[in-house]
Image (spheres, helix red, strand yellow):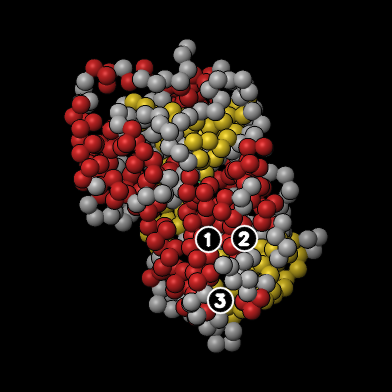
Amino acid sequence: MKTQNAARGHALVLGASMGGLITARVLSDHFAQVTILERDAVTAVPQSRKGQPQTRHLHGLLVSGLETLTRYFPDLPDALTKNGAIVADMAENMHWYTYGGFRQRLHFGANAALMSRPLLESLVRQRTLARPNISLCDNTAVRGLVTSADRTKVIGVEVESRGESAQHERLSADLVVDATGRGSRTPQWLTELGYTAPAESAVKVDVGYATRLYRRDPDDPFGRDWLLSTPEAPKESRFGGLFPIEGDRWIVSVGGWAGDHAPTDEASYLEFIRSLSNPDIYRIISSAEPISDILAYKFPASLRRHYEQLERFPQGLLVLGDAISSFNPTYGQGMSSAILQAAALDKILTQNAVAPELLARTFFKAAAKVVDIPWQLSVGEDFRFPQTTGPKPAGVDLINRYVAAVHRATRFDEEVGRAFLKVMNLLEPPTSLMKPGMMWRVWQANRAHPRNSPSEQTPTQETSVVTA
Ligand SMILES: Cc1cc2nc3c(=O)[nH]c(=O)nc-3n(C[C@H](O)[C@H](O)[C@H](O)COP(=O)(O)OP(=O)(O)OC[C@H]3O[C@@H](n4cnc5c(N)ncnc54)[C@H](O)[C@@H]3O)c2cc1C
C-alpha cells in the first residue's frame, strides 16, 4: 500500500526529463504536492529541448525500463503503439551483428520499445501531469539550494523564472530531488554549503554519434526490425543502430569509440555506414529517403558520482538519474537506470521505515546498487579498447575474454542468447552468465564453431535481413 502521506508535504523535482518525470510520479504517491521545475520551455508536442540534446539520437527502452514504467503508467505500451512506436518482443525482430555474425533471434517473452525519445517522454509527461497533485513550472531555472540556518536541511530552492522579465524567487519544499542530468550542480552547491562533493569516477571513451532520420515504407517487410552493429573490440571500433520509429521513419545512429567518430557530410556518412560489419544497415539506408540533417553528438566519458560514499549530506535533498551516473550511451541503459532508481526510492518511501535524516543515505545506497550493474557492464566493455582510461575494475581483462566467448556463443546457442539479453536488459546480474551450466554452453558453442571455421568466412549470409 502506498503512503499517500500529506504529512510529507511538498516535493520539488528539478528537471522534467525522464528522471524527473518518473521521480515526480513516484513522489506523488507519498507527498501531498509535487512540483517539477524545468529550465526549458516544455511543449505538449513531442520535441527535443535545449537541455537534453541527446534526445535527437537513437533511443531504445530496455525491457526492465519499460516494465517498470508500465507499473506506474499501465496504458503506456498501448499509447506508444497507438502513436506508431514499436513495442515488441525484445529478440524476435533483432538483427544484431557482432563478433563475426548475427546473434540468434529468439522468443524472449518480454517487450522493449522503439520510438523517438521525444515521443516516449511526451507520453510519460502527459501521464505524469495528469496526476492531480503534480504540476510543472517550465522556463524555470534552479539557481541554488535554500537551507536551514545551520545548513543541515535543504528547505527549498532559488529559481529564476524566464518569462518576459526574469524573476528570482524562493520556493520551499520538504524534499528536493535533483534530476538535472549530467550537468547537475549539486556537487558545487554542496561545497558552497561546507559539505564535501562526491568522489567521481570518469571512464574516458571518446565516443561520437552521428544521427539521421529516413522515411520508412509502412509496407516494408523489415519495418519492425531493429538492426545493430557492435564491434568486436578492439580490432573494430564502430557501431551502428537502425530502429523503426513512429511516423513511418527510421532513425539511424552510427559512430565509434576512441575518436573513430562518424563524419556528418553526406558522402562520408554513407561511407561510414557502409563500413559497418552489419551490411543490412547500409542496404536499407542507401535506398531510403533522408528527411533530416546529420546531427553529431560527442560523449567523452562515462561519469559516476559516488553519493553513497559521503559521510555528511543535508537532509531533504536527493539526486537521481544522469545526475548520479551517465553511461556510455551505446549500451542504451540510461533511462532504465533512472527509472529503476526512482522505483528504488518508491520502495523506501512505501516501507515508511526510514527517518527523514536517514533518507538520503538509504536512497544513495539503493541507487548505487541499481547503478552498479549498468556501470559494470558498460565500463567493462569499454575497457576492451586500450585507449579507454579511468578506474579499471579488477579482473576486467579476464572477464572480457569470457564475455567475448559469450558474444560469439549468442550466435549459435539460444539459451546463451537469452541469458545474455536478460543481463543486457538489466533483468539479471552479470554473474548469471558465470554459472557453471552457462559456462559449459558457452564453451561448447565456441568449440563447435571455432574462429576460423568456414562459417566464419561468410558470416553475413546467416540471417541477413535484406537481400540486394
Ligand atoms: C547520444 C545518447 C543516446 C542515448 N541513448 C539511450 C538509449 O537508447 N536508451 C536509454 O535508456 N538511454 C539512452 N541515453 C541516456 C539517456 O538519454 C539519459 O540517461 C536520460 O535522459 C537521463 O535522464 P535525466 O532525467 O536523468 O537527465 P536529462 O535527460 O539530462 O535531463 C535533465 C533535465 O534537467 C533540466 N535542467 C538542467 N539544469 C536545470 C536547472 N538548473 N534548473 C531546471 N532544470 C534544469 C534539463 O533541461 C533537462 O530537461 C542516451 C544518451 C545519449 C547521450
Q: Is mark 2 within 8 Å of ligand 1?
A: no
Disc 3 residue type?
A: Gly
- Residue 288 percent location from the top left of the image: 58, 20
Q: Earlier in the sequence, mark 3 or mark 1?
A: 3
- Residue 72 percent location from the top left of the image: 59, 55
Mark on residue 342?
A: 1
Secondary structure category for the residue under label 3: loop
Disc 2 residue type?
A: Arg
Q: Nearer the viewer, residue 102 or 213?
A: 102
What whole-number distance in Å separates the C-alpha atoms at marks 1 and 2? 9 Å
Q: Is residue 383 left or right of residue 91?
A: left
Secondary structure category for the residue under label 2: helix
Disc 1 residue type?
A: Ala
Q: Is residue 53 left or right of residue 207?
A: right
Q: Residue at x 48, y 77 (%)?
A: 354
Q: Residue at x 56, y 31 (%)?
A: 244
What whole-number distance in Å separates the C-alpha atoms at marks 3 and 2? 18 Å
Query: How many numbered marks are there?
Result: 3
Residue 350 visible in the picture: yes
Please report contact status of discs 1 and 2: CB closer than 8 Å, yes or no.
yes
Give the residue pinned by disc 3.
316
Q: Earlier in the sequence, mark 1 or mark 2?
A: 2
Give the residue pinned by disc 2.
25
